[in-house]
């Protein structure tokens, strides 16, 4: 097994000894003598594993670990804290900083090698998962590119959905799922021919049936990824309606996952306020008025729609437009 390992220690002798032993085992090794240069190496060297001494003069190993784990590009890089401290409190501090493992001084090389190989296997698995996600995102973007009218649609949905999720106080994992779902929610349209996807007029019954398969196909495409566990219900149910008239499962009310209902509102709003082959874009206020009228028919969740409008910063500016007297649901 090969991998890039960054050794961070202000003691030159200890650093060189570790580097020599690891290079003999076939690993690519870089060295840093302080926390500042360690963080720079994380960007330039892109290690698969960081062996990090806790006690250093400028930035402590704990602080370096926190920064590595707080940076999106390096947060999944395993960090092993090397310490002569054995107090439980010190170990807890390391765990809170995000450390993946610990080694005590003096270091047993066989133990170091076993832990290194174990963490590198885990990193390889994580990289494969990330690569699979990148492939799915690329596929989703290529599908979006088939329709010039939907340029930027996925990014807008990702941002609007996550913002509404944050406003509603959803868990961090649910907000992450909304960001991902915004990109891949229509990935199932890979099975929809351009003649249907780009048709300027109304779809026939047969064409509608083909189009309505895309949420299920999208769920099937993404289902092998366990990291998409919270994304799958959003993909499948983002065309359900509050009154049960949506598809593919005819869910109604609270049966619809709140994350799916959130993404659906963003999807509808974006569709109404951008040009499409079958209709010119509505102004934002007009699009929201249409959504309130649809809400009165039972299609959307009124409470969520109110929150969505406030999230857009439009509620106060258009208070008269959204009055109950204009057909909004009570």
Image: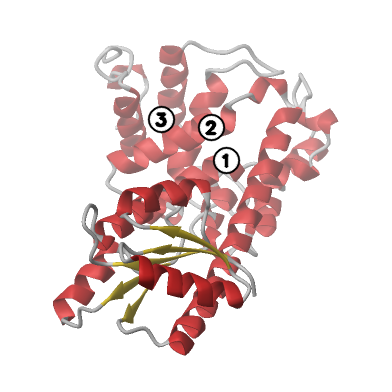
Residue at x-position 44% and y-position 56%: 255
Of tags 1 and 3, the one toward the viewer is 1
Tell me if residue 328 comes above or below residue 207 in the rendering.
above
Front residue of 200 and 244: 200
Residue 78 seen anywhere in this rendered image of the structure: yes
Q: Position of residue 230 (x, y in %)?
A: 48, 58
Q: Which residue is most to the front?
A: 13
Residue at x-position 24% and y-position 66%: 96
Could you classify mark 2 by the number of other residues whose Cα lies within 10 Å: few (under 14), some (14-19), or many (20 or more)?
some
Q: How many marks?
A: 3
Q: Position of residue 115 (x, y in %)?
A: 47, 81
Q: Position of residue 198 (x, y in %)?
A: 77, 25
Q: Is residue 186 left or right of residue 211?
A: left
Q: Earlier in the sequence, mark 1 or mark 3?
A: 1
- Give the labeled residue for mark 2: 155
- Give the labeled residue for mark 1: 183
Q: Position of residue 158 (x, y in %)?
A: 49, 37
Q: Earlier in the sequence, mark 2 or mark 3?
A: 2
- Give the labeled residue for mark 3: 296
Report the quarter where the N terminus lies.
Answer: bottom right
Q: Circle 3 — which element? A: helix
Q: Earlier in the sequence, mark 2 or mark 1?
A: 2
Could you classify mark 3 by the number of other residues whose Cα lies within 10 Å: few (under 14), some (14-19), or many (20 or more)?
some
Of tags 2 and 3, the one toward the viewer is 2
């Amino acid at each position: 097994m090969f991998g890039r390992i960054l050794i961070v220690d202000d003691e030159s002798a200890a650093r060189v000894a570790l580097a020599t032993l690891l290079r003999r085992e076939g690993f690519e090794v870089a060295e840093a003598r302080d926390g500042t240069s360690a963080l720079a190496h994380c960007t330039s060297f892109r290690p698969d594993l960081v062996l990090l001494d806790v006690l250093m003069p400028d930035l402590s190993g704990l602080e370096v670990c926190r920064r590595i784990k707080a940076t999106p590009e390096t947060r999944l890089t395993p960090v092993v804290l090397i310490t002569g401290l054995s107090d439980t409190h010190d170990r807890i501090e390391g765990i809170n900083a995000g450390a993946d493992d610990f080694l005590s001084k003096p270091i047993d090389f066989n133990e170091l090698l076993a832990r290194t190989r174990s963490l590198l296997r885990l990193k390889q698995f994580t990289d494969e998962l990330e690569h699979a996600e990148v492939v799915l995102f690329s596929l989703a973007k290529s599908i979006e590119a088939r329709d010039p009218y939907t340029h930027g649609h996925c990014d807008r949905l990702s941002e609007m959905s996550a913002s509404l999720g944050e406003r509603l106080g959803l868990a961090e994992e649910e907000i992450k799922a909304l960001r991902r779902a915004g990109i891949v929610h229509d990935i199932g349209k890979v099975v929809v021919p351009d003649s249907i996807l780009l048709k300027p007029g109304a779809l026939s019954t047969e064409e509608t049936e083909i189009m309505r398969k895309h949420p299920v196909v999208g769920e099937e495409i993404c289902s092998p990824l366990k990291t998409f566990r919270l994304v799958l219900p959003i993909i499948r149910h983002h065309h359900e309606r509050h009154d049960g008239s949506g598809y593919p499962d005819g869910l109604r009310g609270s049966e619809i996952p709140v994350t799916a209902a959130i993404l659906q509102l963003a999807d509808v709003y974006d569709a109404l306020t951008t040009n499409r082959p079958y209709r010119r874009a509505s102004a934002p206020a007009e699009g929201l008025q249409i959504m309130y009228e649809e809400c009165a028919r039972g299609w959307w969740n009124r409470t969520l729609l109110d929150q969505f409008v406030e999230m857009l910063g439009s509620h106060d500016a258009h208070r008269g437009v959204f009055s109950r007297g204009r057909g909004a649901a009570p």
